[in-house]
Image (tube, rainbow, N blue to C red):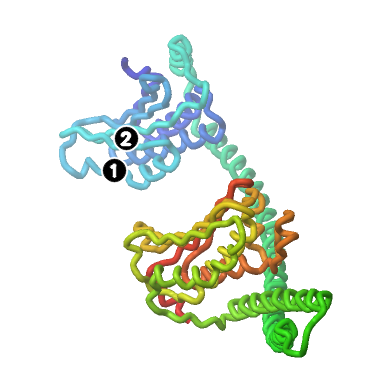
Amino acid sequence: MNNPKLLSLGLNRQQDVVVVRQRAREISGALGFGVQDQVRIATAVSEVARALTQAAPGRRATFALSADGSQLEVTIGGGAALTDESSDSLPELAIVSAHRLMDSCEVQREPGQPPLIVMKKRMPPHARPTAAQIAALTAELASSPEASTFAEVQQQNQELVSTLAELRERQEDLLSLTRELEDTNRGIVALYAEIEEKAERLRRADEMKSRFLSNTSHELRTPLSSIRALAKLLLDRMDGELTVEQERQVRFIEVAASDLSELVNDLLDLAKIEAGKVDLLHAPVVPDNLFRVLKGTLLPLVDGTTVEMIFDVADHVAPFDSDEGKISQILRNFISNAVKFTERGVVRITASNDVAADAVVFSVSDSGIGISPENLQLIFEEFSQIEHPLQRRSKGTGLGLPLCRKLAALLGGEVDVTSTPGVGSTFTLTLPRHIGAANRL
């Protein structure tokens, strides 16, 4: 299907440029383009027409619709065949302007013929004229009189005044927006200053807390050790026999001192980690040897209970570089918690390889009370404990798991937990086979 042609005009003199601008505005307005688009189309067409007419008269401007009616197409060019290369010059500045004002601007060439400049503009939404409307528009354009130069100048002046008014309005909007942004920036600067001040206060408070915990822990360890030693002397009958009631009271003292000593040790470890004063002892860690030590230390926890403790090292778990003492501290905490919250069943401790991550994975699984999903992250917060009858019967410090997470991070690894209430929990410790230089203190 051929492109429906709307109008074709000859470009032989400067007056024809005025006419082509007028027709461009009339056609775009009749096709439903907005005022701004009408000015853009008229300006692009007149600039290209003016430049080509000045270079060589005898060109033509043709207005048409694309075959599918989706675009207005304006073609300017034609004329006599080329006689030399100089007559093939193109108005570069006018073409650049047309590129900016129209959706596209192409230069088409044929051997021996002057170039054609084809400009296109997408039709407004829902503005697809029918064949009858195109025929009526063509007839109207053919019969309408040409505008005088004076009338066209007046029209351009009106367009210029309208554009200047719009630019002034937009400039005022920009100035208003600039002032608003300046006010916002001042508020943000003030907010950053306040945040920085509060952050500095928090840093100082954190340093004071760490010093307080460290100093307090050191001051409490000596008297607690003395209390525990004296309680053991009394229970060993070093100063004579005790009555049943005296022995019961002394055992209360010993248990309370042990619990408080455990709390003090955890507080001191946390304070050291936060202060960056923990030394890592790097050496090859052999999982089999580590499990043998843990088994000898922790099996007494399940003596006389209905809980079975199983240690299992997968095949080919080779030694790796880390701090065995810190790993043992983390696993002891996992195992003691598993035993504490498992009334009957199995506590299984395993070691395996994670080949993809080049890591070693330790896991402690139990068949205990389990943890609800909303409490899985709560257990890693300091001094947080979950309400449960077993928890009230076996009170802890609420510092063990937070300490495990920080120790794992110090070793370049991480801890995680999966759990199902009433079924059991699995705590995992994943460690790299080689600790990076950044983790070596």
Mark 1 and mark 2: span between their CA atoms?
9 Å
The crowd level at tag 1 (other Cα within 10 Å; few <14, some 14-19, many 20+) is: some
Front in this rendered view, residue 142 or 432: 432
What residue is drawn where x is 70% and y is 81%?
A: 213
Q: Which image quadrant is residue 157 in?
A: top right
Residue contact at pointers 1 and 2, CB within 8 angstroms: yes
Q: Amino acid at mark 1?
A: Leu
Q: Which image quadrant is residue 249 in?
A: bottom right
On the image, the x and y values in percent for residue 77 come to 30, 32
What residue is drawn where x is 32% and y is 35%?
A: 117
What residue is drawn where x is 47% and y is 26%?
A: 123
Front in this rendered view, residue 266 or 127: 266
Res 313 seen here = yes
Q: Residue furthest top?
A: 132
Residue beneath disc 2: 117
Secondary structure of the residue carrying tag 1 is loop
Name which of mark 1 and mark 2 comes first in the sequence. 1
What residue is drawn where x is 53% and y is 55%?
A: 365
Q: Amino acid at mark 2?
A: Ile
On the image, the x and y values in percent for residue 34 come to 55, 30
Front in this rendered view, residue 202 or 385: 385
In this picture, residue 245 sits left or right of residue 363: right
In this picture, residue 365 sits left or right of residue 177: left
Residue beneath disc 1: 90
Secondary structure of the residue carrying tag 2 is strand
On the image, the x and y values in percent for residue 381 come to 66, 63
